[in-house]
Image: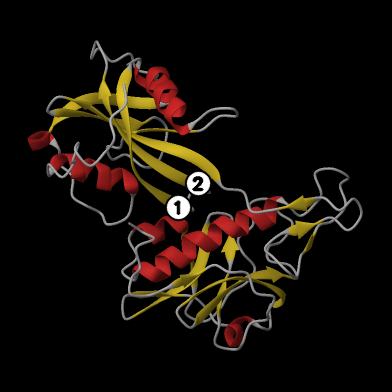
């Protein structure tokens, strides 16, 4: 999956530090990121390439000995709503963040999407939600502080579930409605207030395909910066009728697929695809997963 970057080591401990000239700088504009390709590998600009445009940087994390920072510009874009980014660097261009799904360098892609998650957090918390005063970054931990009312805001991580519904020798796969991603996926959804992850599984399955499930078994989790989420994967068994009642607002289609009918390969990226391939390749061990009715 995208976070599996071994033997490289990801360090997310916060440090109150400034970038050195060879540290990487992440520059986002809406859902695009400033990058270039070097020997087919994705590359971000460094401080020495961007220092004329920026006056403030947020430390993000490090991977091995390489530090990554988020740039805060004096003026990144013009006031026009649909304006193109004003910053241009020789050899660099803006790519949609979907580039992280296919980037050859896994650790670079993981750095980019994790940085985008934090960039969205900084962008949407510029002002205090309690009193409206400008927020300032704390110097001890990754937190934004209101100097007026002392409200503290930490990075938001939204829990969500990915659900592999098993019906004998078949698994339920679906396609999203109205999204750019058109491949088959599994039922998924965000956890609501006052709800356990297992309750989310049962509710989302009923809402999206009108089915009941049992034997809910935790599989694995994944940080997913594309939606600012922590994904929790579960397998479960169909309980009762296999008739699908499709929520057409959420899904374009859904159906039961036998292993030999699954025309997908492991993308080494997402928890969803790994779960599908785990079923397809008969790697789902019921003995190693606790069953619960």
Location of mark 2 (residue): 229
Evaluate if marks 1 and 2 touch, with contact meaning CB atoms under 8 Å apart.
yes
Q: At 27% across and 57% down in the image, what residue appears? A: 268
* x and y percentages locating residue 213 in the rendered image: 31, 20
Taking the view exactly as shown, the residue that stands out farthest to the right is: 148
* x and y percentages locating residue 255 in the rendered image: 23, 24
Q: Which quarter of the rendering shows the N terminus?
A: bottom left
Q: Decide: is 84 above or below 16.
A: above
Q: At 88% across and 58% down in the image, what residue appears? A: 147
The tag on residue 223 is 1
Q: Nearer the viewer, residue 3 or 185?
A: 3
* x and y percentages locating residue 40 in the rendered image: 31, 75
Q: At 34% across and 26% down in the image, what residue appears? A: 252
Count residues near mark 1 (Cα–Cα under 10 Å), then give few for <14, some for 14-19, many for 20+. many
Location of residue 218 by image quarter:
top left
Q: Decide: is 229 above or below 74.
A: above
Count residues near mark 2 (Cα–Cα under 10 Å), then give few for <14, some for 14-19, many for 20+. some
Which mark sits nearer the N-terminus, 1 or 2? 1
Location of residue 22 by image quarter:
bottom right
Q: Which quarter of the rendering shows the C terminus?
A: top left
């Amino acid at each position: 999956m995208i976070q599996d970057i071994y033997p490289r080591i990801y360090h997310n401990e916060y440090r109150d530090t400034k970038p050195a000239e060879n540290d990487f700088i992440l520059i986002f504009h809406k859902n695009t990121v400033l990058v270039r390709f070097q020997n087919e590998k994705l590359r971000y600009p460094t401080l020495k390439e961007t220092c004329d445009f920026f006056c403030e940087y947020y430390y993000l994390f490090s991977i091995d000995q390489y530090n990554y920072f988020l740039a805060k510009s004096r003026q990144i874009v013009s006031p026009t709503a649909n304006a193109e980014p004003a910053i241009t660097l020789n050899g660099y261009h803006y790519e949609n963040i979907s580039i992280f799904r296919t980037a050859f360098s896994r650790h670079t892609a993981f750095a980019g999407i994790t940085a985008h998650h934090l960039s969205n957090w900084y962008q949407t918390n510029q002002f205090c939600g309690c009193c409206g005063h400008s927020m300032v970054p704390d110097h001890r931990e990754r937190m934004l502080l209101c100097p007026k009312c002392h409200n503290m805001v930490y990075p938001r991580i939204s829990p969500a579930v990915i659900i592999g519904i098993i019906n004998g020798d078949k698994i339920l796969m679906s396609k999203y409605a109205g999204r750019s991603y058109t491949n088959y996926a599994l039922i998924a959804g965000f956890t609501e207030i006052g709800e356990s992850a297992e309750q989310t599984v049962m509710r989302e399955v009923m809402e999206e395909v009108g089915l009941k499930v049992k034997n809910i078994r935790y599989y694995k989790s994944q940080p997913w910066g594309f939606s600012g989420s922590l994904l929790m994967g579960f397998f479960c068994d169909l309980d009762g009728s296999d008739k699908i009642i499709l929520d057409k607002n959420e899904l374009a289609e859904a159906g039961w697929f036998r292993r030999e009918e699954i025309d997908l390969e492991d993308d080494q990226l997402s928890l969803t695809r790994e779960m599908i391939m785990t079923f397809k390749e008969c790697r789902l061990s019921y003995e190693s997963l606790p069953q619960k009715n």
